[in-house]
Every structure is written in C-alpha cells, then in structure tokens.
Image: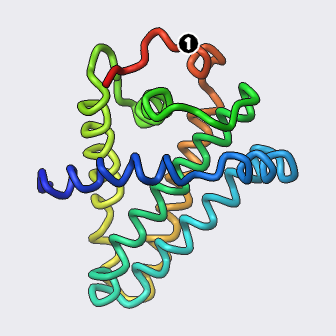
Amino acid sequence: MSEGVAHQLSNSLEFIHKNLDGFKIKEKVDSMGIDGYINYCALLAAGSGAAAGIGGPITMIVGVPVDVANTVAQQFRVTLAVIYHRTGRYAVSFPEFMKIVGLSLGVEVGMMGLQQVVRVIAQVILKKLTARAAGRMIPFMGAAVGGGLNYAFIKTIGKTLLAFEDSIFTDRRALPSG
C-alpha cells in the first residue's frame, strides 16, 4: 500500500468527520431505531460497492475510490449513530471519534498521538476495503461481491460498536492527543 494513498485517506477522515450531520443522524436514529439506521447505512455502502464492481476492471478504476469514500462515510455515520444511541450526544470531537473508530476496527490507540492514530486507522481501512478488489474484476459478479462485502463490513462495524461497554463512549482519559 502506498504511503501517499494512506496519507491522502488520513486527511480525508477528518474532512468526513467534520461534514457529518450529527443532528440529521440523530433524527434518523430516533425515527428508524439504531438497527434500522445501521442497516440503512449498510445498504448505502452496498450500493457503491455494487456500482464499483458491475463492469469489472473498467468501472473499478473510477468506482473504487468513490466506493472507499462512501463506505468510510457510512462507517463514520454508523459510529456517530451508535455514540448517539449510547450517550445521547451527536457531536463528538475528532480525537474522541477517532479513538472509537480505531477500537471498532481493532486498532489499540494506547499512547499514540492523534496523527499517528489517524494514519494507522487510514491504513487499516484501506487494507480492509481494497483487499477484496480482486473479487470485483468479473463483470456483474463483481457487483454482487462488492455490494455484499460492503454491506457485511458496515453491519460488522455496527455490531462491534453496539457490543462495546458504555465506558468506551464516555471515558475520555485514553483519548489520543494532537
């Protein structure tokens, strides 16, 4: 994996977080319930995964970057939705948010600084989302593979976050610093 790609993705993570509409997510969770909202986000991720794989290698070139961006956005929406569901807060600082994102991906943030946490998270996301690219090479079959894997990824993130103890969402002592 290219260090430049990981750096670009790490810069994108803060942009995505900054542009989350927490109030809109709150309203959707209130109307759909947390499980319904997670499923909604998983379906949105599945749509971009299917589109990226429908034409095989030709649509992968353009579709994969768009798919990665959409899947990360859905992952972040699910993360904020679960934070809201568990704490009632729908606005969370970037360092606190990245700690929770990292934990949902199995990244132990420990004593890392914020920039290091963001880079490690970007690398993990990139590895998870691009490792399955080979399955998208076959036209039409790639749509099923891409859509199915994205759906499963978002559902797993939601399930992982819901399984965490409440202290994960409220303990600010272990937050990475800038």
Task: Return the residue nearer the eye: 141 or 161.
Answer: 161
The colouring scheme, among rainbow, by chain, secondary structure or one colour, is: rainbow
Residue placed at 47% from the left, 9% from the top?
A: 173
Q: Is residue 55 left or right of residue 150?
A: left
Residue placed at 33% from the left, 70% from the top?
A: 65
Q: Is residue 36 left or right of residue 41?
A: right
Query: Which x, y percent locates residue 44?
Result: 60, 67
Circle 1 residue: 171
Residue placed at 32% from the left, 63% from the top?
A: 132
Which residue of the protein is positioned furthest toward the right in this rendering? 31
**Quadrant of image for the C terminus:** top left
Where disc 1 sits, the SS reads loop
How many numbered circles are shown?
Answer: 1
Which residue of the protein is positioned furthest toward the top in this rendering? 173
Residue placed at 67% from the left, 46% from the top?
A: 22
Task: Give amino acid for label 1.
Answer: Asp
Note whether 163 is above or below 125 in the view shown. Answer: above
Query: Which x, y percent locates residue 1?
Result: 14, 54
Using the rendered view, name the quadrant where residue 177 is placed.
top left
Query: Which x, y percent locates residue 111?
Result: 29, 14
- Other residues around mark 1 within 10 Å, as few (<14) / some (14–19) / many (≥20): few
Using the rendered view, name the quadrant where residue 109 is placed.
top left
Q: Is residue 142 left or right of residue 35?
A: left
Task: Return the residue nearer the eye: 148 or 127.
Answer: 127
